[in-house]
Image (cartoon, helix red, strand yellow):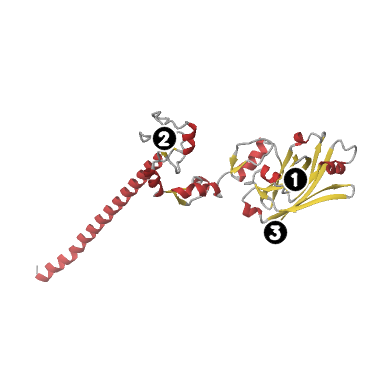
Amino acid sequence: MTRGGVCKEVIESHPKYLRHDVAITKADKTNVITETSRTTEKHTNVVYELLECPMCSKLMYPPIHQCPNGHTLCSNCKSKVHNCCPKCECDMGNIRCLALEKVAESLELPCRHQPLGCHDIFPYYSKLKHEQKCRFRPYDCPYAGSKCSVTGDISNLVAHLRNDHNVDMHDGCTFNHRYVKSNPHEVENATWMLTVFNCYGRQFCLHFEAFQLGMAPVYISFLRFMGEDNEAKNFSYSLEVGGYGRKLTWQGVPRSIRDSHQKIRDSQDGLIIPRKLALFFSGGNRKELKLRVIGRIWKEK
């Protein structure tokens, strides 16, 4: 074989070894990256477990307390156990676990409402503040006739109101709602009524109830929006009640169900009807309440 041929053979074969070396290097790098990710995830999970209060299983935030033997506890649980460590029964004193607090600063964790649609990642100490206002957090049941503990998204709550609370459901943006009470002088027992309206593809709750405004017995009617406050501001509504040539009217913006029923009622953000006037509108011997609330919902342009 000629000298040139030898050179040619070497030149053609040499890159094959180079590609083989590169391929091995890439595989090694992938293995290293995968192993590093697993190690980091495992480390984060261990730290995450350390930050869980052993009593309530909730994440601990400063001040994180510890007993002389190193057992940690959150502030809420520390007061519940009367300063006595639940693990070793030592006096907790006022020792803070500064090391764990410092480690927590380095963590970034997903929002607890990730399964509901929030995919943001937050530093450990910002996570709690975000979760309290996260738009994906579950809504409380808007039924105010009892302290219902059910939470969920809008579609689940609508089904819950219909099936579990037997709430009337109506389609349309106008309504003519009648409220009858045989003994209206028992204001504390006149409580309320709730109806849900499906309008513009969204749901609205119409409330009607009686309560004491100072010493005066009154009725109030208002509308709540089943969604966020910034969405509620896209709508307006009006309410009207009357009789015998007189009427009271109200126009406003529905409040989000993020605001509790009691908060809206106590702020008097709705149509307020003094009981004497309500009985006048009812006619007859004024011993029975018969009120008709007429309303309309519209979307602001």
Residue 81: x percent and y percent? 47, 31
Of mark 2 and mark 3, the one earlier in the sequence is 2
Residue at image point 47% right, 31% down: 82
Give the residue furthest to the bottom.
Answer: 4
Amino acid found under the numbered disc labelled 2: Gly
Left or right of 191 on screen, residue 42: left
Q: Secondary structure at mark 1?
A: strand
Distance from disc 2 to disc 3, alpha carbons, whole Å, reads 59 Å
Residue 179: x percent and y percent? 79, 40
Quadrant location of the N terminus?
bottom left
- Within 10 angstroms of label 3, few (less than 14), some, or many (20 or more) residues? few
Distance from disc 3 to disc 1, alpha carbons, whole Å, reads 21 Å
Quadrant position of residue 54 = top left
Residue 269: x percent and y percent? 72, 49
Of mark 2 and mark 1, the one earlier in the sequence is 2
Q: Which residue is mark 2?
A: 93
Query: Quick one: 145 or 75, which is closer to the camera?
Result: 75
Amino acid found under the numbered disc labelled 1: Ser
How many numbered dots are placed on residues in this image?
Answer: 3
Residue 184: x percent and y percent? 81, 36
Left or right of 118 on screen, residue 203: right
Q: Which residue is mark 3?
A: 300
Quadrant location of the C terminus?
bottom right
Q: Tell me the mark number nearer the camera, choosing from 2 and 3.
A: 2
Distance from disc 2 to disc 1, alpha carbons, whole Å, reads 53 Å
Q: Which residue is mark 1?
A: 221
- Within 10 angstroms of label 2, few (less than 14), some, or many (20 or more) residues? some
| 160, above or below 133, in the image | above
| 232, above or below 156, in the image | below
Amino acid found under the numbered disc labelled 3: Glu
Query: Quick one: 33 or 138, which is closer to the camera?
Result: 138
